[in-house]
Image (cartoon, rainbow, N blue to C red):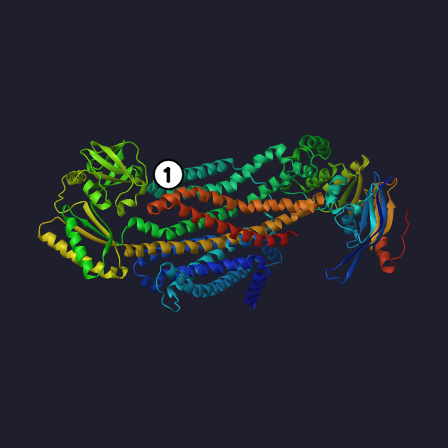
């Protein structure tokens, strides 16, 4: 069963006085199955961030539809959106987006408090997640007191605690050193193995190679995709790297068609 | 060429940072203008035209100059430090891009120079323009004629140049020090400091509570005007210190207690608000305390000077019951007739008549209440008597009383009539020195007695049986072993209104002349009359107006200046909060908070932070009320209703202004966060 379905998404930005139009997404369609770990790759300006913002319901497409667990998210009324986001989506950002006014524990609690959960229940939910993410000892600390990797694990915990349908990750390793990045990616794989669906936007081949499937976006369209299948992470890394090279060279000669490697 | 580059860069910097520089520049300009105006006014030769009150007026204005100088130094430093904090990132960037600290210093030198030059030139211009208006207002308050024409005070300009020259130099050095002490990375991050969770300083919070509490306690419990006056500044200092402690430590401690309470804290609204407030208070506590203290000062200053000004007539009427009062020190019972004939003669010559005449002989005594007994013998009085034990007693005889009040009271031996003024007197015995006098009747009226009336609650009027008793009392309050043969404390008061005000000046002159003659004769004839005083109400009024009008002017002037300072602090607070909140705003939205919800919580936080100082200022003013009322009593202003009205209206106007400032600055804030 596909948990996320994206059909013919199009987004055109118009400057304030309607002068010029910029097409960020021209026609994007894909779907994500329950329990999948999908990475989306593309160059800067390819429309990745726009796509993610639309999936996150932070932005609205010009046309097309987004179905999450069969429900059209674009039909949700503006005032219900925040609650919808809170209950169904988990977010992990490049710059962590932790609130410096809250302790680590309160940062994780934030979405639950917003949903009006009681303290004992929150505490109960937090315990297993914190021990799995190895942040139990940090709970009382504040964001400025912990390392980047620990901040990102806090953000993951915050995303997980609502038990969302889908976790959206935007360049989650972007601000981390390689060791922290590796451990975060292993964490993503683990979470994914336990059944959590993850959609990650990234620049990093290494990050993408830990995913089960990689989508390539170019000029506002899904250009190509590769499945990891039974391949090891190293083989996956090689395949992605080859595809990107091909993408770069093909783009200079012709923008047409997809290249099938699988 | 190279120099020209830095000069130009400095100009560009100021223009690029207009959002923070324009208010700073305006502050500097207004401060310079205010200083010039007050300083020029205090030296204005036109003040001498305001004949009688000029001395006290000048003192008021000079005091104002000092307050403004002090204020300028503190305030310009405060705004400048805010400015530097905002600009650290920019300066760090220049540093990273290869400008050495020497270059930066040169750039900052030019910036400071520009600000100094602009603020001094424009400030003087504005000051000179407004100076005339201020003088007109002042002269109007003093009910005096104003000579036309501009007056430019070179001395005031010189003083201002010295003060502000030194001030800007210090500010330049301070900026340099900040640059030299920090490295580029710190400079780059400078704008984002203050992320740390503030520590709760319980001790400081406790000290603050105690300080504020004792300040309030003093204000509420002191009932004696003299004591109120001496303790007022002590209470003010307690309250100011307490305010700073409570805003910085107390607020955070209180919020942390709330955070510890899980049931309360983990509720959607409280969660965001409490944690947000902790950080807001950390960053703004000092600014908010500044606003609170300044607001309280404005309120207290304006309301009390207004009450003094508007209550002046009332007070003058009480102290000087009649247009002209003659005070004669004499121990002769016949003095009344002598004075009467002199006055009648003078008035007849001037073709006017005395009205509402009150004449009586009395004895004013300083008394100390020791163990419930009123003591007037100097050898029995304790040195360093507490103000609460002090009483002013006016003795007179029953004949004099009846003559003055038109009554027919009678007294037996050992009996007195007692008037307790605005205070109350319990019991029907009057214990004076070694004797207990029986109070035959408590009086509700007593002939006017200016000197004693000022004492209000601690003034007693005592009517004794006859002149012999009065003389006995006079003996009692003389120091033993001192020769009193050519002096007496017995005083004869002869007070009356004129039916023709125009004749007042001539009458006064003639009275003075005639009394001198009378005194000379008395000396020739061997005593009985020792001291003469012609007290003219209108003259006293003018003298008093000089003081009160001056105080009102300085009060309102400083009030305006302080309000301006408040506006600026609020504006800067809004800007700096805006930048911090912007980031938080986006994160909360991503994590799943409604835009409207965010706006609502932020709005409520901003409102709380914003109106907290106003509310606290209101509370301070309310607690200061009884104390200031006592002090005003000391100045013979006892009209509670008037003072209450003045305070109420002042607070209302201030609150409206404050709200106006909020709505204006809030717009800048919302522009930043959205």
Give the side of residue B238 with respect to residue B391, left or right: right
Examine the rendered structure and indicate whether residue B19 appears above or below residue B270: below
Residue B392: % across, % down: 26, 41
| Res B93 quadrant in image | bottom right
Residue at 49% x, 48% y is B290
Q: Nearer the viewer, residue A236 or A224?
A: A224
Q: Nearer the viewer, residue A60 or B444?
A: B444
Q: Provide the chain ID for the residue under circle 1.
A: B
Residue B127: % across, % down: 44, 63
Give the side of residue A224 with respect to residue A50, left or right: right
Residue at 90% x, 52% y is A259
Residue A6: % across, % down: 84, 47
Residue most extreme to the left: B525
| Res B473 quadrant in image | top left
Q: How crowded is the residue under tag 1: few (<14 C-alpha within 10 Å), some, or many (20+)? A: some
Tell me the element at label 1: loop
Examine the rendered structure and indicate whether residue B80 appears above or below residue A232: below
Residue B347 visible here: yes
Which residue position holds label 1?
B222
Give the side of residue B505 with respect to residue A233, left or right: left
Residue B183 visible here: no
Q: Quadrant of the N terminus of chain B?
A: bottom right
Examine the rendered structure and indicate whether residue A155 appears above or below residue B667: above
Residue B121: % across, % down: 47, 65
Q: Nearer the viewer, residue B50 or A191?
A: B50
């Amino acid at each position: 069963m596909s948990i996320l379905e994206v059909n013919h998404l199009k987004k055109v930005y118009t400057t304030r006085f309607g002068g010029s139009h910029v097409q960020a997404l021209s026609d994007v369609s894909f779907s994500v199955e329950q329990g999948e770990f999908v990475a989306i790759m593309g160059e800067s300006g390819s429309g990745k961030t726009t796509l993610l913002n639309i999936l996150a319901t932070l932005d609205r497409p010009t046309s097309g539809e987004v179905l999450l667990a069969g429900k059209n998210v674009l039909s949700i009324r503006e005032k219900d959106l925040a609650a919808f986001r809170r209950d169904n989506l988990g977010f992990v950002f490049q710059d962590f987006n932790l609130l410096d006014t809250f302790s680590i524990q309160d940062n994780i609690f934030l979405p639950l408090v917003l949903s009006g959960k009681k303290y004992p229940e929150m505490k109960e939910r937090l315990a297993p997640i914190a021990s799995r993410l190895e942040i139990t000892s940090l709970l009382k600390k504040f964001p400025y007191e912990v390392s980047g990797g620990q901040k990102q694990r806090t953000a993951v915990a915050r995303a997980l605690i609502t038990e969302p349908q889908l976790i959206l990750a935007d360049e989650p390793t972007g601000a981390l050193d390689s060791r922290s990045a590796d451990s975060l990616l292993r964490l993503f794989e683990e979470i994914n193995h336990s059944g959590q669906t993850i959609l990650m936007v990234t620049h990093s081949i290494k990050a993408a190679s830990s995913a089960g499937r990689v989508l390539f976006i170019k000029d506002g369209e899904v250009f190509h995709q590769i499945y990891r299948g039974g391949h090891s992470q190293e083989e996956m890394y090689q395949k992605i790297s080859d595809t990107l090279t091909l993408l770069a060279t093909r783009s200079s000669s012709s923008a047409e068609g997809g290249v099938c490697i699988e | 060429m190279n120099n020209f580059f830095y000069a130009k860069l400095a100009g560009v910097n100021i223009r690029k940072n207009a959002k923070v520089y324009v208010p700073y520049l305006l502050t500097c300009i207004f401060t310079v203008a205010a200083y010039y105006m007050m300083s020029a006014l205090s030296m204005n030769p036109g003040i001498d035209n305001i004949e009688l009150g000029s001395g006290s007026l000048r003192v008021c204005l000079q005091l104002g100059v000092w307050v403004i100088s002090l204020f300028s130094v503190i305030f310009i430093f405060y705004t400048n430090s805010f400015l530097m904090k905002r600009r650290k990132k920019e300066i760090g960037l220049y540093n990273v891009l290869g400008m050495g600290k020497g270059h930066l210093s040169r750039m900052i030198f030019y910036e400071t120079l520009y600000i100094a030059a602009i603020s001094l030139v424009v400030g003087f211009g504005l000051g000179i323009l407004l100076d005339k208006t201020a003088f007109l207002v002042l002269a109007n308050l003093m009910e005096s004629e104003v000579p036309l024409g501009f007056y430019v005070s070179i001395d005031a300009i010189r003083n201002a140049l010295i003060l502000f020259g030194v001030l800007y130099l210090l500010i330049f050095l301070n900026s340099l020090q900040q640059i030299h002490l920090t490295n580029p990375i710190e400079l780059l991050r400078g704008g984002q400091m203050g992320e740390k969770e503030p520590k709760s300083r319980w001790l400081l919070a406790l000290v603050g509570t105690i300080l504020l509490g004792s300040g309030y306690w003093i204000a509420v419990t002191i009932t004696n005007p003299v004591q109120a006056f001496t303790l007022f500044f002590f209470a003010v200092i307690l309250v100011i210190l307490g305010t700073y402690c409570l805003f910085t430590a107390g607020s955070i401690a209180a919020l942390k207690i709330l955070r510890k309470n899980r049931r309360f804290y983990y509720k959607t609204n409280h969660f965001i608000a409490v944690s947000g407030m902790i950080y807001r208070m950390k960053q703004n506590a000092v600014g908010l305390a500044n606003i609170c203290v300044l607001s309280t000062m404005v309120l207290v200053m304006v309301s009390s000077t207004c009450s003094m000004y508007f209550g002046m007539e009332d007070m003058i009427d009480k102290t000087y019951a009649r247009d002209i009062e003659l005070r004669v020190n004499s121990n002769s019972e016949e003095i009344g007739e002598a004075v009467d004939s002199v006055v009648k003669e003078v008035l007849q010559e001037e073709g006017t008549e005395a009205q509402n005449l009150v004449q009586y002989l009395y004895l004013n005594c300083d008394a100390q209440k020791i163990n419930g007994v009123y003591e007037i013998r100097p050898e029995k009085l304790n040195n360093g008597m507490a103000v609460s034990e002090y009483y002013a007693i006016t003795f007179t005889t029953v004949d004099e009383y009846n003559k003055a009040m038109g009554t027919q009271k009678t007294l037996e031996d050992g009996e007195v009539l007692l008037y307790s003024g605005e205070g109350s007197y319990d019991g029907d015995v009057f214990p004076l020195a070694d004797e207990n006098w029986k109070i035959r009747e408590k009086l509700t009226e007593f002939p006017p007695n200016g000197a004693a009336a000022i004492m209000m609650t601690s003034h007693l009027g005592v009517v004794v049986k006859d002149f012999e008793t009065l003389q006995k009392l006079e003996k009692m309050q003389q120091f033993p072993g001192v020769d009193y043969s050519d002096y007496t404390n017995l005083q004869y008061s002869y007070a009356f209104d004129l039916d023709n005000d125009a004749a007042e000046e001539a009458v006064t002159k003639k009275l003075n002349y005639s009394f001198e003659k009378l005194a000379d004769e008395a000396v020739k004839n061997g005593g009985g009359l020792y001291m003469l005083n012609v007290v003219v109400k209108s003259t006293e009024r003018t003298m008093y107006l000089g003081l009160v009008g001056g105080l009102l002017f300085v009060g309102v002037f400083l009030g305006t200046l302080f309000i301006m300072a408040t506006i600026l602090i609020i504006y800067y607070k809004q800007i700096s909060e805006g930048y911090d909140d912007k980031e938080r705003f986006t994160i909360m939205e991503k994590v799943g908070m409604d835009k409207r919800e965010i706006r609502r919580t932020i709005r409520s936080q901003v409102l709380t932070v914003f109106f907290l100082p106003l509310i606290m200022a209101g509370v301070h003013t309310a607690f200061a009320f009884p104390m200031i009322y006592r002090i005003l009593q000391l100045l013979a202003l006892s009209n509670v209703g008037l003072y209450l009205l003045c305070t109420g209206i002042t607070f209302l106007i201030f609150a409206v202004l404050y709200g106006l400032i909020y709505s204006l600055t809030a717009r800048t804030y919302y522009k930043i966060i959205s």
